[in-house]
Amino acid sequence: MKKVVVIGGGIAGMEGSTYLKSMGYDVTLIEKNSQLGGHLLKWEKLFPTMRLGKDVVNFLNDGIKISDVNVLLNTEVVKAEKNGNEYIIELNNGQKLNADAVLVATGYDTFNASQKEEYGYGVYDNVITSAELEELFTSGKTLTTPSGKVPKRIGFVHCVGSRDEKVGNIYCSKVCCVTAVKQSIEIKEKLPDVEVYCFYMDLRMFGMHFEALYREAQEKWGINFIRGRLSEACENIDHSLVVKVEDTLAGKPLKMNVDLLVLMVGIVPSQGTKDIGRIFGLEFGVNGFLKSLDQHMANSNSNVPGIFYAGTCVAPRPINNTFVDARSAAVMVASYLENYKVEGRINTINN
Amino acid sequence: MVDFGFSINKDRQIDFDNADRRIIEYVAKEESTIAICLICGACTATCSAGNFTDFNIRKITNMIRVGEIENLKEEIKKCMLCGKCQLVCPRGVNTRNIILKINEAIKIFHE
């Protein structure tokens, strides 16, 4: 039986493993944390349907269980060698695994918001990230600012660590716009009297039903959108914040007090993605994510035969696309292992 | 006092916390579709009055949101209420009624 090692137990890794195992391969899924699920474990509700993140985790876990994937938790890859067409993968517990193919699903990290020092994350008490707000939702605690106040006005800053050459990330992280809309609505559900302001450059509502959610935010929940990128946030003596922005549609600078400022942090390649890339000699693209053999025709293929990609180690993507990508990667792994006739097309891609 | 000819410029910055939001609050209550305006400018591109004057309904809609209401009464007088703006609006905002409601709000709060 041919062996496949899947690295990373988030959405892509779990779903990829499930299908590879179902196809009849001997699959080992490696996860560095003590639990499968990745970032999704910390996410209460998902855009645009407000489905519980937990539901998706359960679905993924069912797949792993039903197909009986061999899962190694608290495990990391430290070294890899090639022996003919086979990889010998050394783990941090000293164990060695043989693999005929490897599926890399090492995912993303959220952007470190303290790099945008003008927004005061890590300096001012009441500046938090979107991920932290989500954790607050998940915890079920009452929504207060870190300084313990029930907020009257909340600001959301879009594109923190995205589309910003100053921090070296020129790309769009794709999921933050609609996440801000989703989280604003959730805040209004919990605290109907709070005023919410979103500061954006563009609202990229590309997905199915995203635009409808944006409209709902305006129409039903009275969420306000001000077009302009925040230039800075300063703290008042009572720990509320003054934000400065140009209302670019009014053509005038504007200042406003908010009790809580939420930074919509973008997606960056995870440390694991960088490490695995180095270990296997994979090519990185201009944005620091792993580079697909071809952006149109061979998204799951890498520059190294036998090594495949799934999920956000390649680029920012929402959960639905990650599912599709993982299943598609499983097909590409099978095509390689079985040497399907069509595999020749991949080998002739000239990039 | 001797006039040296110096003067102080008025601050151009919108001070949102002290902005006069009575007009937007009134209009939002009376014509709720203002909340879904995307500020795209299709209304302004087709505006009959805008072809001959500097009337700009997109700008007015945005300006009242942040309390910038100087000359508002004079501005809305330029509108001919032809309703072409409403025909092109991608979100079905009742633009014509917004002008009428601004007019009402000015009478209530500023006259």
Image: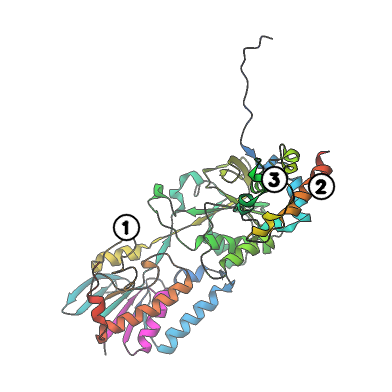
Q: CA distance from mark 3 to mark 1?
A: 43 Å
- Secondary structure type for disc 1: loop
Label 2 marks a residue whose chain is B
Asked whether residue A5 is drawn in magenta, I would say yes
Amino acid type of the residue tagged 2 in the rendering: Glu
Asked whether residue B15 is drawn in magenta, I would say no
Amino acid type of the residue tagged 3 in the rendering: Ile
Label 1 marks a residue whose chain is A
Q: Which residue is mark 1?
A: A286
State the mark number for residue B64. Answer: 3
Residue A248 occupies which quadrant of the picture?
Answer: top right
State the mark number for residue B104. Answer: 2
Residue A170 lies left or right of residue A213; in this view the side is: left
Residue B51 lies left or right of residue A289; in this view the side is: right
Q: Which residues are magenta?
A: A2-28
- Whether labels 3 and 1 share one chain: no
